[in-house]
């Protein structure tokens, strides 16, 4: 993050004294976490409960006007977030109306319990949670024990196996996806028509983790941007390799095919978490 960008951390209770040289709207950036099971995804949808809709309703209550937000990434129905970033513009008077600490408290009070505002930062005019982002990280959890998970149940893909996944094969397959490629095979077919499907994956790792005494496999994906359901299709395809249904080099063949029907299944939404955004 640029050290020259003025910011205010959450913890201060006093009013902001930062001012910008022009009178364009300054931007507020929220870092939020949410459990996605209760929502129809991130993006606002008329008549549906969404993350963006809940945030904008809370902001309208606070500022007595419509406040449009921009998210760093859209998550599908059932997908969670640990470090999603949402930005919106406020004028000088509105910024003075609530300190950033009070804004965080008010938004946490006005939004559903499945949403938590972790941090609030003041950004200069022109900042966008989406377009200013340089890197996004997602993590997908797979649970393979024969007995079902308890604490991790809402946050993993339970894939019971008599034999363990071939993690080394999954790692070898994952390496074939790192770099800049056309990921047509790894996105929803209808969303790729007449659109640029080239994306850059900068890191794709598979490793073990333990949460609340339950072990799982984590697929960590870092890239500049992602296509619709791209990560879930990648995970579903890597699982095919892990189950020894295909060799690792099959992933390269799928990539070259540029055909969604050649890839594996779309992994379930609940295993995916939007982990963090870098600027």
Image (cartoon, rainbow, N blue to C red):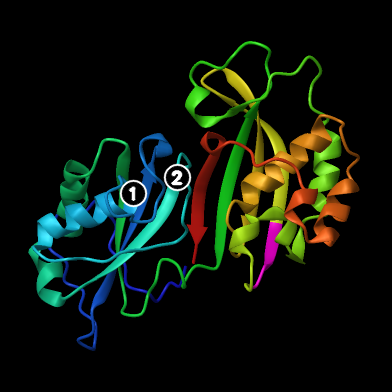
In reply to whether residue 199 is colored magenta, the answer given is yes
On screen, residue 101 above or below 213: below
Q: Is label 1 in a helix, a strand or a loop?
A: helix
Label of residue 77 in the image? none
Residue extending farthest to the top is 147
Q: Which residues are magenta?
A: 196-202
In reply to whether residue 101 is colored magenta, the answer given is no
Q: Is label 2 in a helix, a strand or a loop?
A: strand
Residue at (67% x, 16% y) in the render: 145
Residue at (86% x, 54% y) in the render: 252
Q: Is residue 85 left or right of residue 173?
A: left
Other residues around mark 2 within 10 Å, as few (<14) / some (14–19) / many (≥20): many
Who is closer to the viewer here, 221 or 57? 57
Q: Which residue is mark 1?
A: 51
Q: Position of residue 106 (x, y in %)?
A: 15, 48
Q: Position of residue 146 (x, y in %)?
A: 68, 12
Q: Which residue is mark 2?
A: 81
Please identify the quarter of the rendering in which residue 240 is found.
top right
On screen, residue 278 above or below 153: below
């Amino acid at each position: 993050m640029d050290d020259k960008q003025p910011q205010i951390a959450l913890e201060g209770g006093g009013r902001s004294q930062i001012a910008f040289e022009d009178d364009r709207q300054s931007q507020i950036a929220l870092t939020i976490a949410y459990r996605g099971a209760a929502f129809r995804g991130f993006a606002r949808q008329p008549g549906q409960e969404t993350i963006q809709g809940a945030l904008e309703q809370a902001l309208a209550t606070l500022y007595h006007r419509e406040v449009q937000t921009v998210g760093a990434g859209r998550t599908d129905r059932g997908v969670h977030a640990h470090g999603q970033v949402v930005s919106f513009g406020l004028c000088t008077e509105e910024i003075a109306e609530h300190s950033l600490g009070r804004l965080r408290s008010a938004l946490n009070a006005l939004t559903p319990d499945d949403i938590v505002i972790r941090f609030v930062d003041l950004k200069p005019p022109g900042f966008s949670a989406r377009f200013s982002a340089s890197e996004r990280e997602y993590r997908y959890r797979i649970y393979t024990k024969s007995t079902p998970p308890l604490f991790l149940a809402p946050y993993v893909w339970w894939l019971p196996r008599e034999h363990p996944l071939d993690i080394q094969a999954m790692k070898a397959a994952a390496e074939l996806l790192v770099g800049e490629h056309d990921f047509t095979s790894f996105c929803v077919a209808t969303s790729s028509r007449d659109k640029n499907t080239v994306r850059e994956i900068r890191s794709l790792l598979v490793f073990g983790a333990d949460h609340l005494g339950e072990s799982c496999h984590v697929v960590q994906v870092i890239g500049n941007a992602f296509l619709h359901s791209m990560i879930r299709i990648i995970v579903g395809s890597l699982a095919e390799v892990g189950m020894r249904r295909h060799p690792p080099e099959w992933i390269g063949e799928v990539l070259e095919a540029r055909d969604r029907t050649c890839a594996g299944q779309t992994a379930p939404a609940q295993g995916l978490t939007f982990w963090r955004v870098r600027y």
